[in-house]
Image: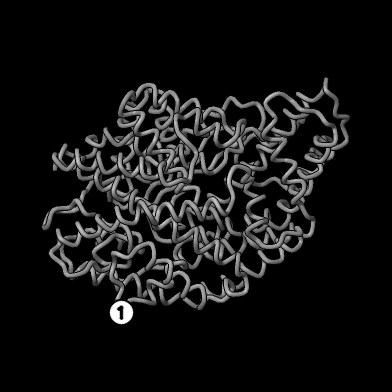
Amino acid sequence: MLKNLPSTPEALTAWTWTEIEPHYQDLESRPLTEAGATEWLADWTRLGEKLEEMYSRLSVATSINTVDKEADERMNKFLDGIFPHAMAAEQKLKEKLLASKLEPEGFEIPLRNMRAEAELFRQANLPLLSEEKKLSLEFDKIYGAQTVQWEGEEVTLTRLAMTFQQPDRSKREQAWNAKAKRQLDDVEAINDLWVKFMEVRARIAKNAGKPSYREYTWQQKLRFDYSHEDCKAFASAIEQVVVPAATRIYRKRQQALGLDSLRPWDLVDGWYSRPTQPAGAPALKPFTTIDELKSKTSAIFHKVDPALGKHFDNMVAEGLTDLDNRKNKAPGAYCTSYTSIRKPFIFVNAVGIHEDVMTTLHESGHAFHVFETAEAPYIQQLAVPMEFAEVASMGMELLASPYLTGFYSETEAARARIEHLEGMLLFWPFMAVVDSFQQWVYENPQAGADPRQCDAQWGELWERFIPGVDYSGMEQVRDTGWHRKLHIHQIPFYYVEYGLAQLGAVQIFGNARRDQKKAVADYRKALSLGGMVTLPELFQTAGAKFGFDVPTVKKAVDLMEEVVGELETKV
């Protein structure tokens, strides 16, 4: 058994490769036999958990304060001095296990994944992968520093977004223009960074012997159960079924506001409408303090399932959440895992709007996945396909939605639920823009490396999938929208997962309308399987179909519009 592994977060984040390497050498030198496989895998798991948690804690430190030079230095030391060596050492252990021909119980899917990873691995890519992560940090710095002067105060763009929900249209327009102007100030910086991303990714793909970065990423993301052609079929189904439904939502918003056309400042983020807010009604204000957000969210989870409520309470009690928005905090939201202790950490930028509630529910769904897989014996069994990892989060949004009266009156809760369901319908076309854009970028890497051509492609896709919003005179803001979708820059091709997962989540929601207790039990059972079965099997266990076809999409859209109709009688 491995000894002298770090036992505290402080010791873990101070770990050096000199201290780490002997453990890998020990595992590499040991004979791997059927009799000793269990202990060998357990030790590999303990070591891998420590490395994963080390990276997670260092990453969290850089995102909670993007100007923390010490945290930045520690992360760079990890990326330069540990990450490449650890990747190489991990590769040797994977090769050792594959060469042994052993097939431990519950390892069928992990072995399949290892074979793909072993085939993809190239020593020459290790410094390039580190460089790519550094470029991601630069992207965070650019957006983390974006603030504007608003009503005599310096505010983050996230906080400024609260203004987009105000009934005063002129103020919404003023705020939207202030945000857009500040973002356009960084156009050249993002363009320069993009060229570097594309150059690094082209080299990574070439080193791995792949015809394009898309093929590289497909294998890297272990996508065995669908192809990029399936993604195009999904986008086509969305265009046929969802775009008309989304256009109806935009038209309803336009009519409610008495407008000749719907402008981007009449929405939350250029595509996300809030059509249920009656003219002149104040925006939903679910909470005023972060403690209130925590306590009310806890109450909701206890109603969904007492065990899930307990999980959330434990996170709060142990300081495993950072929910408030502030200057120099990285944008966005995420859940990461402190793998060696099998506990999650949630990162949100909450400013007191309804979206913050839904984001907290979403990231908590990811956190529950960490808790539900805690009994899996080996780290390799924790590698959940992202398409299902997002079912955990989006499914939780919907399972929790009937209990939003914990934040609102019954009428307000109905408004919030309509907003959520219609927001999901509006999301699918936006997802199709993002994924179709990335398909185009890496199918046409020379054009995709040219920011101006990227602008043109993004604008064309926007008009195809989101025709209900008038960007006249604002074309540059529309066409540079790809700048502001961090997934495109930091996690390429990680976006169709959301669309596929949403389709699964809606099916789970439909099951819960018939039998909530069984639906939640099936959901938790599927979460507990981690990465030990195929993607279609995970969906099936959760009570959903993994599909891309028009009938499956239409059934989901029909359900969502039906529920919206029911809720509208309460508004």
Q: How is the image coloured?
A: one colour
Residue at coordinates 28% horizontally, 50% vertically from top-left? 352
* Quarter of the image where the C terminus is located: top left
User: In the picture provided, is 501 more to the left or to the right than 399?
Assistant: right
Q: Secondary structure at mark 1?
A: loop
User: In the picture provided, is 407 more to the left or to the right than 129?
Assistant: left
**Few, some or many residues within 10 Å of mark 1 (<14, 14–19, 20+):** few
Which residue extends farthest top?
35
Residue closer to the observer: 84 or 113: 113
Relative height, residue 186 to residue 95 (above, below): below
Residue closer to the observer: 40 or 7: 40
Find residue 59 and report its horizontal and vertical position in percent: 57, 51
Find residue 294 and report its horizontal and vertical position in percent: 34, 38
Locate residue 10: give its quadrant. Answer: top right
Residue at coordinates 26% horizontally, 67% vertically from top-left? 265
Q: As shown in the figure, which amino acid type bears the numbered disc 1?
A: Gly
The residue carrying mark 1 is 473
Find residue 98 and report its horizontal and vertical position in percent: 81, 36
* Quarter of the image where the N terminus is located: top right
Residue closer to the observer: 269 or 344: 269
Residue closer to the observer: 223 or 551: 551
Locate residue 401: give its quadrant. Answer: top left
Relative height, residue 295 to residue 258 (above, below): above
User: In the picture provided, is 496 more to the left or to the right than 146?
Assistant: right
Relative height, residue 324 to residue 153 (above, below): above
Relative height, residue 524 to residue 487 (above, below): above
Residue at coordinates 24% horizontally, 35% vertically from top-left? 406
**How many marks overall?**
1
Find residue 282 and report its horizontal and vertical position in percent: 15, 54
